[in-house]
Amino acid sequence: MYIDWTYIILVLPAVLFASWAQMRVNSIFKKYSQTGTSRNVSGYDAARAILDANGLRSVPIERVRGDLTDHYDPQSRVLRLSDSVFGSTSAAAVGVAAHEAGHAVQHAAGYRPLAIRNAIVPICNFGSKIAFPLVLIGILFSSAGAFFVNLAYVGVACFGLVTLFQLVTLPTEFNASNRAMAGIQACGLLNAEESTAAKKVLWAAAMTYVAALAVSLMQLLRLLLLVGGNNRRR
């Protein structure tokens, strides 16, 4: 029975970390969804206030189904808030809505990491789809010649694009959270206790992006070891 020790040693710990981070953000969001705002500010109100304060009155805010499906769409320049955020007057909802407004502000300001991330999305999506097939075909047929060895390395490079995307995403998300907290303070949306709650929600969410990068890095290292090891055995 074959056991992939590279996955167990490298990738599995990162996957467990990612699972923990996701459970934690859900738990913290649920906890602070019970913390109301003294000014009765909703997620929509918070996003609208921050957008307007940054000269983005033309950016519409739409409601979308689901929980934590909130996002800013740079293509259509629309901010979308989930059912659990749009009308909620909790500190958690205000934090999440402010974060997404932060992405809209980044876009308007030409924030470089966001611009890079948006630009590489198509090629990264393509790379993620073909990476593993190329690596698998390259390894299986490596004995047939150098072409297949090189094909495996092309697959690794394609997965490297996924890692690059995660790497660029990290500063983008942290910066959006910083803008969110600054906007909350500047607009007077939350008091000190409520701001602390919102910050905890955003910090927990940020950890999911750290975990995603860790998984991607470990998977990239694993593929390099597998392809390199197979090449040495030829």
Image (cartoon, helix red, strand yellow):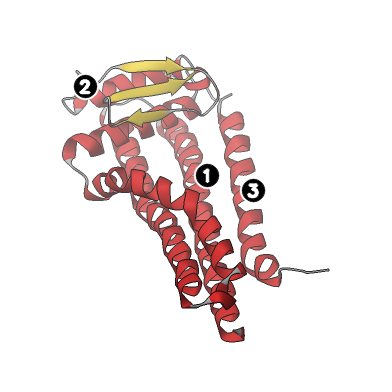
Kindly identify the residue that appears in the image at 19 percent across and 29 percent down: 54
Q: Which residue is mark 3?
A: 19
Q: Which residue is mark 2?
A: 52
Coordinates of residue 98 in the picture (x, y in percent): 36, 30
Q: Indicate the quadrant containing the N terminus: top left, top right, bottom left or bottom right.
A: bottom right
Question: How dense is the environment of label 2, judged by Cα within 10 Å: few (below 14), some, or many (20 and up)?
Answer: some
State how far apart marks 2 and 1 are (Cα). Answer: 27 Å
Which amino acid type is shown beneath numbered disc 3?
Answer: Ser
Amino acid type, mark 2:
Asp
Residue shown at 24%/39% (left/top)?
106
Choose the circle earlier in sequence order: 1 or 3. Answer: 3
In this orientation, which residue lies closer to the viewer: 180 or 20? Answer: 20
Nearer the observer: mark 1 or 3; the answer is 3
- Tell me if 193 is positioned left or right of 73 in this view: right
Q: Residues within 10 Å of mark 1 (few under 14, many from 20)?
A: some
Q: Is residue 126 above or below residue 77?
A: below
* Number of disc labels: 3
Q: Quadrant of residue 229?
A: bottom right
Residue at x 29%, y 19% (from the top left corner): 48
Q: Is residue 219 visible?
A: yes
Q: Position of residue 231 (x, y in %)?
A: 55, 80
Query: Residue beneath label 1, please?
Result: 204
